[in-house]
Image (tube, rainbow, N blue to C red):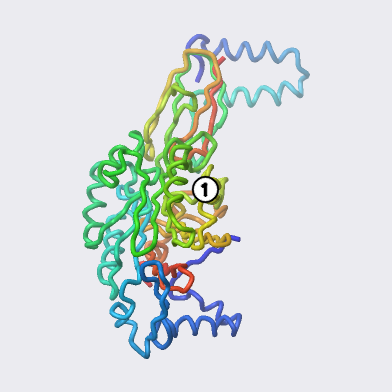
């Protein structure tokens, strides 16, 4: 998935241009993770009492979706006061989405199992 | 030191095989309870030795008089519907039938939280109807599943209506002081359970009016001590509560949340987690995380259970009997 402001080919072109400064070997190791994460940049899985990925960086305007894959309910609850977002209880298989319009750092946790934490960084 | 005890038909057999002295100790304990020795009872907070003279265990109620006996159930999770228990209402019903059918009737019952799975009104309704079938006064504290989305307002209005919406309270029964604590609200990111300054100030005030010789029973949902912080099993400010409890000569802390029997003893403070009536969870660190432990259907009831607590000892420390739904 990509930002609405940049079509897929533009993202790929930018990655390639940035890689020109690197050596051939480091370019390979650098490019693959970028392409893999670009495909899943706006989704977070909740599984085994963990947010995965726990840290997510997106562009402003991105809609991020969390899906609960556990047999226990979880929440996606902003850690800030007042809360920037709060999903309420997500039963198994349920999703919650929030669009991050403003750059910043958005830590969050599960209000049922607060040891579960994550963060969305919006550029 | 945490001791994991799974009570059931095999409880104690390993000890007996390993140690003759342990076997003698168990035999002595059994004698006292079978009616061939002296039964120490706590009557109005005062321990009394009662010669049993060969009376049968069934005759104990008339002998012990006001000895205090109560029951703890926990984590009924009404609304959960997956493996390993698609029908936790049925297993709660089984637990209640065991309590109702016991030879000795307990004075009352404690429910240590996660009455519901998703805080839904129909889940609370079902649980309340089944629990009331025991015919016992029941005191509740909420689990985190009971306070989803509304900071516990629906739970407190139904199960702790006289606490002005805060959920914590205390009461006295036959010389024992009972304290209900709420550690599932205002949870902090990265933390565990949480009591908060206001509740701790209330606890300090509540205890200040008690003699240190008064036996205390504290009941709450999440363990007050850090059972396994990596899974969130503990209370961030539990130490502050324990500091207030330590001066007392007999302190018993009962909680749920971890769905298994674990115990820790610190001086006069004994902390005991209880089994669920809905589903088991793995031993701390055994597996990828907390959550329902998927046992075979035929094994399920061996992992669920109830706890009976009897104040019948010289030093005011209760005897706990954790029984599974098949034992």
SS label for mark 1? loop
Q: Residue at x 34, y 88 (%)?
A: B55
Mark 1: give few (<14), some (14-19) or many (20+) Cα within 10 Å. many
Q: Is residue A13 above or below residue B187?
A: above
Which quadrant of the view contains residue B64? bottom left
Which quadrant of the rendered structure holds the N terminus of chain B?
A: bottom right
Q: Residue at x 52, y 37 (%)?
A: A116
Q: How many numbered discs, if any? A: 1
The one nearer the camera, A9 or B162, is B162
Relative to B66, B36 lies left or right: right
The one nearer the camera, A11 or B170, is B170
Q: Position of residue B114 (x, y in %)?
A: 36, 48
Q: Residue at x 48, y 43 (%)?
A: B193
Which quadrant of the view contains residue B276? bottom left
Q: Is residue B55 above or below residue A56?
A: below
* Residue B269 seen in the figure: yes
Subunit ID for the residue under disc 1: B
Q: Position of residue B93 (x, y in %)?
A: 26, 61
Relative to B147, B189 lies left or right: right
Relative to A113, A121 lies left or right: right
Instruction: Return the residue at label 1.
Output: B234
Q: Position of residue B54 (x, y in %)?
A: 36, 90
């Amino acid at each position: 998935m990509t930002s609405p402001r940049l079509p897929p080919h533009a993202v790929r072109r930018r990655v390639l241009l940035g890689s020109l400064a690197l050596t051939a070997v480091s370019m390979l190791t650098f490019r693959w993770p970028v392409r893999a994460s670009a495909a899943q940049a706006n989704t977070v899985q909740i599984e085994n009492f963990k947010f995965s990925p726990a840290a997510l960086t997106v562009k402003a305007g991105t809609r991020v979706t969390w899906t609960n894959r556990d047999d226990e309910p979880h929440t996606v609850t902003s850690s800030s006061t007042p809360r920037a977002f709060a999903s309420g209880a997500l039963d198994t298989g349920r999703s919650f989405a929030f669009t991050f319009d403003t750059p910043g750092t958005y830590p969050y946790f599960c209000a049922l199992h607060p040891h579960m934490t994550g963060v969305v960084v919006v550029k | 030191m945490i001791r994991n005890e799974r009570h059931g038909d095999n409880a104690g057999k390993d000890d007996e095989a390993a140690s003759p002295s342990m076997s003698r100790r168990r035999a002595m304990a059994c004698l006292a309870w079978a009616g061939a020795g002296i039964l120490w009872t706590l009557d109005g907070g005062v321990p009394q030795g009662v010669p049993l003279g060969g009376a049968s265990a069934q005759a104990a109620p008339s002998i012990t008089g006001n000895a205090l006996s109560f029951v703890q159930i926990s984590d009924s999770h009404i609304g959960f519907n997956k493996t390993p228990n698609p029908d936790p209402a049925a297993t709660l019903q089984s637990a209640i039938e065991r309590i109702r059918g016991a030879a000795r009737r307990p004075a009352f019952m404690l429910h240590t939280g996660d009455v519901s799975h998703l805080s839904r009104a129909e889940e609370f309704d079902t649980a309340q109807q089944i629990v009331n079938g025991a015919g016992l006064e029941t005191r509740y504290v909420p689990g985190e599943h009971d306070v989803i989305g509304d900071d516990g307002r629906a739970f407190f209005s139904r199960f702790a209506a006289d606490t002005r919406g805060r959920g914590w309270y205390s009461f006295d029964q036959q010389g024992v002081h009972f304290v209900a604590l709420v550690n599932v609200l205002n949870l902090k990111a990265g933390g565990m359970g949480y009591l908060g300054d206001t509740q701790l100030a209330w606890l300090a005030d509540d205890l200040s009016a008690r003699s240190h010789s008064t036996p205390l029973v504290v009941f709450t949902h999440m363990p007050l001590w850090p059972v396994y912080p990596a899974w969130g099993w503990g209370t961030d400010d539990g130490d502050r509560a324990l500091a207030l409890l330590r001066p007392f000569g007999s302190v018993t802390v009962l909680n749920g949340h971890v769905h298994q029997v674990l115990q820790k003893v610190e001086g006069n403070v004994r902390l005991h987690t209880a089994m669920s009536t809905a589903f088991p969870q793995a031993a701390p660190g055994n597996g990828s995380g907390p959550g329902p432990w998927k046992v075979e259907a035929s094994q399920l009831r061996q992992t669920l259970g109830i706890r009976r607590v009897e104040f019948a000892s010289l030093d005011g420390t209760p005897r706990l009997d954790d029984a599974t739904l098949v034992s």
